[in-house]
Image (cartoon, helix red, strand yellow):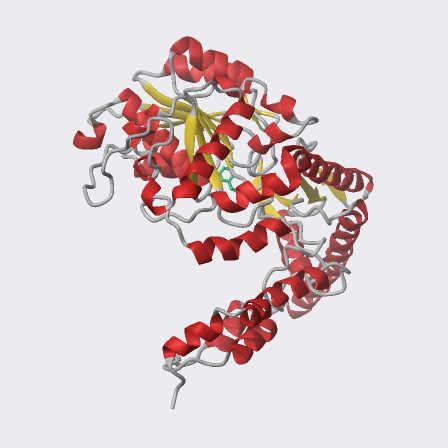
Amino acid sequence: MAPDILATLDDDASAAVAQAFTTLAVDYLAATRDRSGRVSTAHTRAELAARFTEPLPRHGHTIDEIVARLRDEVLPDSNHLYHPRYIGHQVSAPLPAAIWTEALTAALNNSMAVWEMSPVATVLEHQVIRWLTDLAGYGPAAGGTLTTGGTEATFTALLAARAALLPDSWTNGIAEPAPLLVCGEHSHYAVTRAAGALGLGLRNVRLVPSVAHRMDPSALFAALDAADRPVMAVVATAGSTATGSFDDLQTIGEICTARGIWLHIDGAHGASALLSSRHRHRLRGIELADSIALDPHKMMLLPLQAGTLLVRNARVLDGAFAQQAPYLFHGTDSDQLPDLGVRSFLCSRRADVLKLWVALQRYGADGLGELFDHLCDTARAMYDAVCVHPAFEPVHEPECNIVCFRHVGSDELNRDLRERYNRSGAGWITTTMLGGRRVLRATIMNPRTTGEDVRAVVEGVGETAKGEEEQRAKGDKKNKGRK
Ligand SMILES: Cc1ncc(COP(=O)(O)O)c(C=O)c1O
């Protein structure tokens, strides 16, 4: 007979079971340190799916069996972001103290909807937001909310901008002609996605061209002058997704202030430079924005999820979500520490603030700033390696921890060599299109990654390109032979 389910819960609440799980994580952190293992899987998605195609378990298994499957079937073929040669997407090798906090967050499971559901976490979230708005140079009226990430933060900011321009839109929707949304051509898709979701429609988005991957302020002037309708918001980017470039926030901020237009800064990637003594200057003028997206799960190296939205005036968020819910929102007796659910897109929401608070307690704002600088230095070392390698050309000079470069060969070669290199397990990089051309892209999100590592990746990608070219040459010969 299956063991009693209630007794199983009691057993699983023990330190021994907790340790079985944490040991897996600790072993993973240790095993990736010496660089000997693979960075990622060589299997196809169909092969991995076949591993888990099994009937729904009607009865539970033992912890030992489950831990063994996690160890043997999940861990080896997951992406190892802690491996120093994973330099792919903008997802961190997370701070250890923040990793361990996750279990406590889950154990407490206090929801952020209202203070009565999370008495301490609500207070902590207000406090952490206050620290961040202070760093941004906002005044005492500022506020914000944690979000699942930059996409939700930008969506919420633009919802607030919509409410500011069209206070009736929550009830009546948007009448034609819809207002315009103006953003840089290199904006993250979170911006156009919000335009679609908010009922503006993509045809009412105006893309401003760039110079050196940054929004061209004179083109912004021209776009605003040409606007035949009110502009709901301008979105500038601090740390663009493709190249990590920072728009000129001071100039853009002055333009928006002079015209009374809402400025949102998508600093999901780069606004964490607020913590850095060496890169803070890239954010000059950030305090001119009405709203800022800043993702601690990117350059503050927190585990997913942890985003923030900071606003110069906390009240604007009440306008963003003009919602009644008598079963939850009973009105608040605190102006300073209001319920957070009224200001958030989500209802149930994890207390992600806890890991952010622990990370700040453990490493300090300066420690996190040093890590930011360290990641950028490593990106610079990669750029230097690209510049001296005969097979590669740089595409831009890195402003933070993102480096785009390309093999001097064709677009197809760049695309295929990246896939081949990643499959080799030696390292992992990404790719994007820039100026109509396929480029290779690396993001340094792991403090363990050294100059040696990034040089090894550049060499490895170069060797892979030779292999790919040889194979293509053979393929060409065969094809010619057949003709
Ligand atoms: C500039 C920028 N904005 C927004 C986002 C979206 O953030 P998230 O994935 O946290 O929703 C990203 C993610 O890559 C980004 O680089």
**Quadrant in which residue 226 is drawn:** top left
For the C terminus, the image quarter is bottom right
Can residue 121 be seen by looking at this rendering? yes
Q: Is residue 13 left or right of residue 333?
A: right
Q: Residue at x 66, y 29 (%)?
A: 276
Pick out the residue farthest to the bottom: 1
Q: Is residue 414 above or below residue 251?
A: below
**Quadrant in which residue 112 is drawn:** top left
Residue 45 picture location, percent across and down: 52, 68
Q: Residue at x 62, y 24 (%)?
A: 282
Q: Is residue 208 above or below residue 448?
A: above
Q: Residue at x 79, y 52 (%)?
A: 456
Q: Residue at x 33, y 26 (%)?
A: 335
Total labels drawn: 0
Q: Is residue 343 above or below residue 54?
A: above
For the N terminus, the image quarter is bottom left
Can residue 93 be seen by looking at this rendering? no
Q: Is residue 114 left or right of residue 374?
A: left
Residue 278 picture location, percent across and down: 70, 26
Residue 68 picture location, percent across and down: 58, 77
